[in-house]
């Protein structure tokens, strides 16, 4: 099978097409023929620095939409020919930038019939991150005020929709050029980070920090007592941020996304109901992975970038 790999850490130019043996599914695993694989910032960070994966060679990618090719012993959920999507175990289950992947069957859920593989492939990691941050960690509920930073980004634009589906009042930070797009997703208030100071906000219940740096400490000032900041940038909340949160009587938490069959089913249900959609900034063929990384690293794209590995129009 074809796959995108690298022998050294570095820029997008280190990515190359290679041939690898097609994997075989083990007990409770499925072999999926990948049709589309979404990109996320974690991909270019690992490509450049190794991150949690250490030294290459490795095949990156965690987002998968495709068709079950084979099932291993003990699999009861799927049969060959079923269309599925899901997130490979983060971080060590990587390998979506290839023609085939194997993973535990409950990594995947059925792909909604009314979206194609490119749309489905754009969703899993970013949607799971938003869901686990807002729903599981912060417990967003109807009537709350939710602030989403980088609201037009991969996680951000899905978080806006998930928060709206929970009945929240959603405030987003984004450049003015992206405000109309975010209004179309349901955002109630928008702040142009270039000309306005979001830290002037008050009585926010939940902040989703997708940026890091001083955004976390400054966001704490916006929270009402008992509110929560959830960072998807920090692997652990540092002492300074924790101390400031304690003094303000709010919570500061961090998280890494995890595979979650129940959450993926909830995400698929929102898609089917027309309440969640991925904005695809670009869809490029597998062999143009380096170009896709270059585009992603501009930090100017709206939504997600997807690699097309197989037919993108199959439903």
Image (cartoon, rainbow, N blue to C red):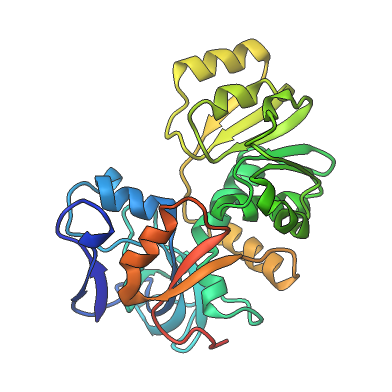
Q: Quadrant of residue 228?
A: top right
Q: Is residue 128 above or below residue 74?
A: above
In the shown orientation, is residue 174 left or right of residue 97? Answer: right
- In the image shown, does 229 or 290 lie closer to the viewer? 290
**Does residue 64 appear in this view?**
yes
Q: Is residue 282 above or below residue 255?
A: below
Q: Quadrant of the C terminus?
A: bottom right
Q: Quadrant of residue 291?
A: bottom left
Residue occupying the point 63% across, 77% down: 112
How many marks overall? 0
Location of residue 97 in the rendering, given as x and y in whole percent from the top left corner: 33, 69
Location of residue 99 in the rendering, given as x and y in whole percent from the top left corner: 32, 79
Location of residue 16 in the rendering, given as x and y in whole percent from the top left corner: 22, 69
Residue occupying the point 62% across, 52% down: 152
- In the image shown, does 264 or 145 lie closer to the viewer? 145
Residue occupying the point 31% across, 65% down: 290
């Amino acid at each position: 099978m074809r796959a995108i790999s690298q022998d050294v850490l570095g820029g997008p130019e280190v990515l190359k097409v290679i041939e690898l043996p097609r994997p075989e599914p083990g007990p409770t695993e499925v072999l999926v023929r990948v049709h589309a694989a979404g990109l996320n910032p974690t991909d270019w960070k690992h490509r450049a620095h190794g991150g949690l994966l250490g030294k290459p060679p490795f095949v990156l990618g965690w987002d998968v939409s495709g068709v079950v090719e084979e099932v291993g012993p003990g699999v009861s959920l799927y049969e060959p020919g079923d269309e599925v999507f899901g997130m490979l175990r983060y971080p060590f289950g990587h390998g979506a930038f290839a023609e085939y992947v194997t993973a535990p069957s409950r990594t995947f859920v059925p792909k909604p019939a009314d979206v194609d593989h490119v749309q489905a492939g754009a969703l899993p990691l970013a949607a799971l991150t938003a869901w686990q941050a807002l729903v599981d960690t912060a417990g967003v509920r109807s009537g709350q005020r939710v602030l989403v930073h980088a609201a037009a980004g991969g996680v951000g634009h899905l978080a806006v929709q998930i928060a709206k589906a929970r009945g929240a009042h959603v405030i987003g930070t984004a450049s003015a050029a992206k405000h109309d797009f975010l209004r179309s997703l349901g955002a109630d208030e928008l702040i142009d980070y270039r000309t306005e100071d979001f830290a002037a906000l008050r009585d926010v219940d939940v902040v989703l920090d997708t940026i890091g740096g001083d955004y976390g400490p400054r966001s704490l000032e916006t929270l009402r007592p008992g509110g929560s900041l959830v960072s998807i940038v920090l692997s652990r909340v540092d002492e300074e941020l924790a101390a400031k949160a304690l003094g303000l009587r709010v919570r500061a938490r961090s998280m890494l996304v995890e595979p979650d069959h129940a959450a993926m089913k909830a995400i698929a249900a929102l898609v089917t109901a027309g309440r969640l959609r991925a904005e695809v900034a670009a869809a490029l063929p597998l062999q143009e992975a380096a170009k896709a990384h270059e585009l992603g690293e501009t930090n100017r794209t709206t939504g997600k970038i997807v690699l097309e590995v197989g037919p993108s129009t199959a439903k």
